[in-house]
Amino acid sequence: MNQIFQGWELPTDLGGNLSWYKGLIENLNVGIVVHGSDTSIITFNKLALELLGISKDQMIGKKAMDPQWKFISESGAPLDLMDYPVNKILNSKTKLENFVAGISHSKSSKIVYVSVNGFPLFEEDGTISEIVISFIDISERVNSNKLLNESNDLYFSILKNSPDAMALCSLEGIVEDISDIALSMFSYDTKNEIIGRNIMEFIHPEDIPRAMENFQKMFQGVLDGPEPYIGVGKEKKKFPMEVNGDFVKDKNGTISHILFIIRDLTERYKIEKTVRESEEKYSKVFHTSPYAITLNEVKTGNFLDANDAFYQITGYTKKEIKEHPELGKSIWVNDRERLDVMEELKNGRAVFGKEYEFYKKNGDIIYGLYSAQVILVNNKPVGFSSINDITAQKQISKELEAKNEELKKINEEKNSYFSILSHDLRGPINGFVSLSELMVDEAETLNEPSIYKMAQSMKKSASNLSLLLDNLLQWAKIQRGLVPIQIQNTSVNKIYQNCIEPVLPSILKKEINFINKVKGDQNISIDPNIICTVIRNLISNSIKFTNKGGQIIFEINCLQDGGVEIIVEDNGIGMSQKIMENLFIITHQKNRKGTDGEPSTGMGLVICKELIDKHQGKLLVESEENKGSKFTILLPSFPIA
């Protein structure tokens, strides 16, 4: 490519300029054809098809030796096969310059005269790999010269009807005739305003030195093709133009005049500016987009280019992508999904907003909304894809989903618990009301023993109701986060005293053998209020479900890792496996009565479990029916205050 445009300053960043190359090749006023070493045609541009008069399908693979080619010399004589441009370069292994030939146009059978330039491209071993041919249509120039030599009438016809502006000048550059289009182009009304003036007067002063140099080159026969200048019209009106020149010979073959062919480039420059601005907008959008954008080969999935957002999101560098284009395949977590996307693109179908997983350079996985479609760059299909990183949104969505499930579960438990609670409250309250009504209605007939019995029943209902309300209030405080953790350095002896005193009457009443294995000289770091609440609850439970004369063991141990182990073990009635499975679920409490008919709300162990969880500990239970239960509290190590 660089050899084709030798002397041009071409961009080196492929990613943002693919369409630039395409636009350049397609808009050049030059036919381009590239042949392989066997002279078969590899590629070409649109103008080449138009000049040769054949279709795209007819062009591909056609060889220079093909008998359908019909080349003639400028004089009209058929060219020998080996004098065809490609064959001349293939045989000489040197470039070909300004070779003029006529080609029979297959669609119209007319002769198209072209000026041919070409050069070979070599492999490292010196063999020819490709031959690049460029040619411009000089039919108008050749035919004009012929017509001028043949007839002045034909000359004037061409001057009048040519789509390009023309100026016939003397060898000194004085204008002798000019076409109507040239008058309009330079904004003059009559030919007399121009005829007799030097052609250089219509070129901007800054361009005159270059124009004079090109004028000399034309005389030397080394000027190839039209040159751009700034034209100057009437009232100093400036506009871009392109000027090509050729010599006019008299009947004797002597050069007598110069014919300048002039084209107004204003519209072309507008188009080029629009294309350039479009390119700049595309490049800006491509590189500043917050979405990761890549250009990939459709067949292989290999990277061609990527924008800054892609490098930021994936952690790769531009150098890594350039040196390892195959990374375009390895970023997909699921290769089957990648192959499915490639199949869609190969079949001309786009992919929009589908969620896939991708690997970052460090191995992390990101979630992305992926879109892709095929675009044409230099007539080649290229995959254009974008990835919108939704990893953060995905994580938030998962967290919200988990929170919603948790809230749903808590709400269901709350509703279920309040349903159970309303039933449990209704019993003692109804009993209270019934006994009160009975005492009021039958007060005159009730004797002292009957009143005493009613009072005992009311006391029992009131105690049960008070216990239920106390547990309910404690549970509500925990749920609302009103039970803060306050770690203190406390002696185990103090904990024992605070826990045993409130339950000592119950121990004595049931004649329980209470075995204390606490070593009073130890200090532990805990929240004494929370832990004492849990211990009292566990000891009360053991008393409640241990038969008269039974045994309870209580111990506190300091562990090697700095943690604390607290054990409350009894030889009471124990629990079944089914009871143990639902032991800490608030909606599954059975309010089991104690061995002496002691009331129970079923909430005590639920509260214990939640308090130990807040203390970052664990509450373990072992039990067997009719053999007793063992509750173990494991607390983590906390810094000593």
Image (tube, rainbow, N blue to C red):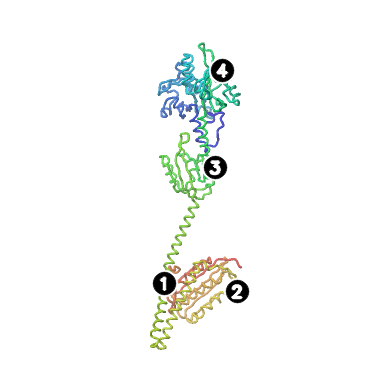
> What amino acid is labelled 4 in the image?
Gly
| Front: mark 1 or 2 | 1
Labels 1 and 2: the sequence-earlier one: 1
| Front: mark 1 or 3 | 1
Labels 3 and 4: the sequence-earlier one: 4
Residue ID for mark 1: 422
Q: Which quadrant of the view contains residue 110?
A: top left
Q: Relative to 57, is 537 above or below? A: below
Residue 196 image label: 4
Which element carries disc 2, helix, strand or loop? Answer: loop
> What amino acid is labelled 3 in the image?
Glu
> What amino acid is labelled 2 in the image?
Asp
- x then y, percent, for residue 184: 51, 24
How far apart marks 4 and 1 lie (CA) works out to: 117 Å
Labels 1 and 3: the sequence-earlier one: 3
Residue ID for mark 3: 320
| Front: mark 4 or 1 | 4
Labels 3 and 2: the sequence-earlier one: 3
Marks 3 and 1: in contact by CB < 8 Å? no
- x then y, percent, for residue 51: 45, 25
> What amino acid is labelled 1 in the image?
Ser
Label 3 packing within 10 angstroms: few (<14), some (14-19), many (20+): few
Residue 521 image label: 2
